[in-house]
Amino acid sequence: MLYFFLNKPASKEVTAVTIAEVSRKYELSPDTLRYYERIGLIPPVPRTKGGFRDYNEESCGWIELMKCLRAAGVHIDALIEYVKLFHQGSETIEARKALLLEQRELLAARMEEMRQSLERLDHKIATYDQHFAEKERQLRQAQTDEIP
Amino acid sequence: MLYFFLNKPASKEVTAVTIAEVSRKYELSPDTLRYYERIGLIPPVPRTKGGFRDYNEESCGWIELMKCLRAAGVHIDALIEYVKLFHQGSETIEARKALLLEQRELLAARMEEMRQSLERLDHKIATYDQHFAEKERQLRQAQTDEIP
DNA sequence: ATAACATCTGGAGTGGGCTCCATGTCAAGA
DNA sequence: TCTTGACATGGAGCCCACTCCAGATGTTAT
């Protein structure tokens, strides 16, 4: 019966998933990861006995989600609210969906605005191309004129 | 011949286009308009004898362009550089086009990133919908059970 | 046990992009 | 002319989203 005490249970990790590893994995600085947790953009991360963060799959999922949505410009306050609702349990499922829908619409609107800006940039660039074409035409004309 | 001196020339504006008007037109605060000019995001605006800004069509064109590109997230430094090149004359036309092309690519990349985030949001929202459907199915089932 | 290093916390500092303010000048109506 | 209000400038202040730091504690290799 002794091995029961000697062997560590296979289902438990021996080493913690450190903030440095997660930092590398998601290309977010340890400071940023701690900051996100502090402001509630991600739920509290489990700790080791020593008090070090030990990121599990769920923590990583939150980080990845938030990195993605933040990069898309979703407002940080809305995301913090989302996490808060999540913590309040299944009562808030509809509120959470509503929040996501609202942010989805804002995101779509921003994309449409960007589409228009892109169009405008393309038009401006085309104008420059036109300018070059005209210049080249004049050069060719000059060459032809030289040939007589 | 006297009326020649009495009448103001029809080709010149009698009143200046003030910063307040332009502010209303583009929904940018007077402070922001002055700030944009100060940092070189738009070229210097012509002035009245008294030193007040008198926006002409060109000034307005710059403001509109910059408002559009800034809203799309084009970096302010790149736009300032663009204005600087513009002021250096036609020597810089190719450099200006290159700058616009570079910003265009960055913009397109950001849009692609946002497209992926939107997809992700839609997927998450769909998951909530699925949850509601499941809940409703259970409710209906319960009702059916009650009937016997 | 000790050195070297990673992580912890709370709080201060930074940079971008405005926004506000004090003080002074200009302009238009009574 | 005098008052009232818009505009000018330079510089300070503000908000956001980090980023850095000091000092303390935990971990690992020798």
Image (cartoon, coloured by chain):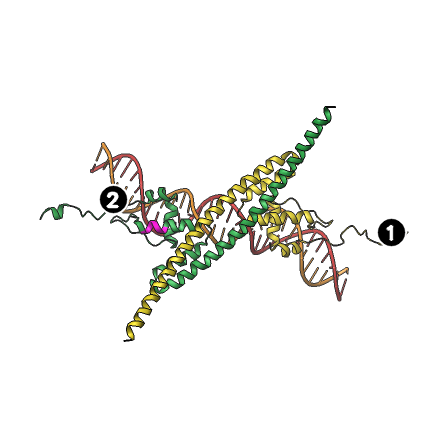
Chain colours: A green, B yellow, C red, D orange
Pointer 2 chain:
A
Residue lying farthest to the right in this orientation: B1
Q: Which residues are magenta?
A: A58-62
The residue singled out by tag 2 in the image is: A15
User: What amino acid type is highlighted by mark number 2?
Assistant: Thr
* SS category of the residue bearing label 2: loop
Q: Which label number is shown at residue B4?
A: 1
Q: Residue at x 19, y 47 (%)?
A: A10
- Give the x, y percent position of residue B65: 61, 47
* SS category of the residue bearing label 1: helix
Q: Residues within 10 Å of mark 2 (few under 14, many from 20)?
A: few
Q: CA distance from mark 1 to mark 2?
A: 94 Å
Residue A4 in magenta stretch: no
Residue lying farthest to the front in this orientation: B148
State yes or no: discs 1 and 2 in contact (Cβ < 8 Å).
Answer: no
Q: Does the rendering let one see residue B141?
A: yes
Up-down: is B10 above or below A89? above
- Give the x, y percent position of residue B81: 58, 39
